[in-house]
Image (tube, grey):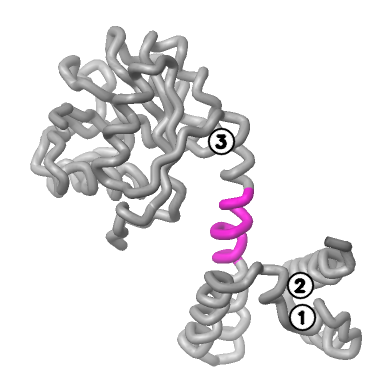
Amino acid sequence: MSLKLCFIGAGNLATCLAIAFSKVGFEIVQVYSRTEDSAKSLAEKLQTEYTTQTSLLVKDADIYVVALKDSAVDKVLSQINIGNKLLVHCSGSLPMNVLSAYTENYGVFYPMQTFSKQREVDFKSIPIFIEASSSGNLQVLNNLAHEISESVTVLDSETRKSLHIAAVFACNFANHCYAMAAKYIESKELPFEILRPLILETAQKVQELHPKDAQTGPAMRFDENIINSHLKQLEEMPGMQELYNSISKSIFEHHQEKE
């Protein structure tokens, strides 16, 4: 499959996705970012051109991949003119039709994974969810996705948004709890590293068990003595105390629900 790609954005997702496409032989003809350091850094990894000016965006790419934060998409796209080239965004929450004002050919290319520039991921195991404005565009995106992933699913905008909400709970909120655990344990002069085996086992356990069956701890048992003792100790960190109390209540209530 021979297609020229232009990346609009040079953050975590853009970096990982562009490198993945480059490795399987796609030509990344240009990288755009409002920040020169980000654009230059990614362009150097891809050995391609970059720009920080929308007016200098190339006109000859086959697909323009928008990997920006949601609030920046309209602002950036309103400054470009790509004719009727295929334009796709990579957002979990934005509806597909936000692109309809900019071209007749548009779609969504959403890899559901957490991405960081510093960490390379294996796209083969990453599920990619696609949507497009026509059957022809959908076939192009389906072929494109299968070049890097073994899991490709057509999903409408509303269902994708629901999936993204679940992903936020499973990834972003879970990681925030790791960050809070790190903040607390390090305040007691203990290293975060001692929690890594617990975090790993927690993640591995839900590969075999449903999360509800995998749940342990004082909140599920509603062990008031332990919960109240923990809450008292967290008085020095009221934000964390509130989070502990809220999550504990949620865990208990969830386990009172009938299947």
Q: Residue at x 73, y 75 (%)?
A: 237
Q: How packed is label 1: few (under 14 Cα within 10 Å), some, or many (20 or more)?
A: some
Amino acid on which the number 1 mark rests in the picture? Leu
Question: Quick check: marks 1 and 2 in contact, CB under 8 Å?
Answer: yes
Q: On the picture, is 18 further left or further right than 244?
A: left
Amino acid on which the number 2 mark rests in the picture? Tyr
C-alpha distance separating marks 2 and 3 = 28 Å
Give the residue at mark 3: 93
**Mark 2 vs mark 3: which is more N-terminal?**
3
- Residue at disc 3, secondary structure: loop
C-alpha distance separating marks 1 and 3 = 35 Å
- Look at the image and tell me whether residue 38 can be seen: no
**Mark 1 vs mark 2: which is more N-terminal?**
1
Q: Position of residue 190 (x, y in %)?
A: 54, 91
Q: On the picture, is 159 further left or further right than 255?
A: left
**Mark 1 vs mark 3: which is more N-terminal?**
3
Q: Position of residue 169 (x, y in %)?
A: 63, 56
Q: On the picture, is 224 further left or further right than 144?
A: right
Q: On the picture, is 231 further left or further right than 124?
A: right
Give the residue at mark 2: 244
C-alpha distance separating marks 1 and 2 = 9 Å
The N terminus sits in image quarter: top left
Depth-wise, is mark 2 or mark 3 nearer the camera? 3
Q: Residue at x 53, y 73 (%)?
A: 203
Between residue 69 and residue 222, name the one nearer to us.
222
The C terminus sits in image quarter: bottom right
- Magenta stretch holds residue 169: yes
Q: Residue at x 83, y 69 (%)?
A: 255
Instruction: Write down the region rendered in magenta.
Output: 166-176
Amino acid on which the number 3 mark rests in the picture? Ser
- Tell me if residue 60 comes above or below residue 92 in the rendering: above
Give the residue at mark 1: 234
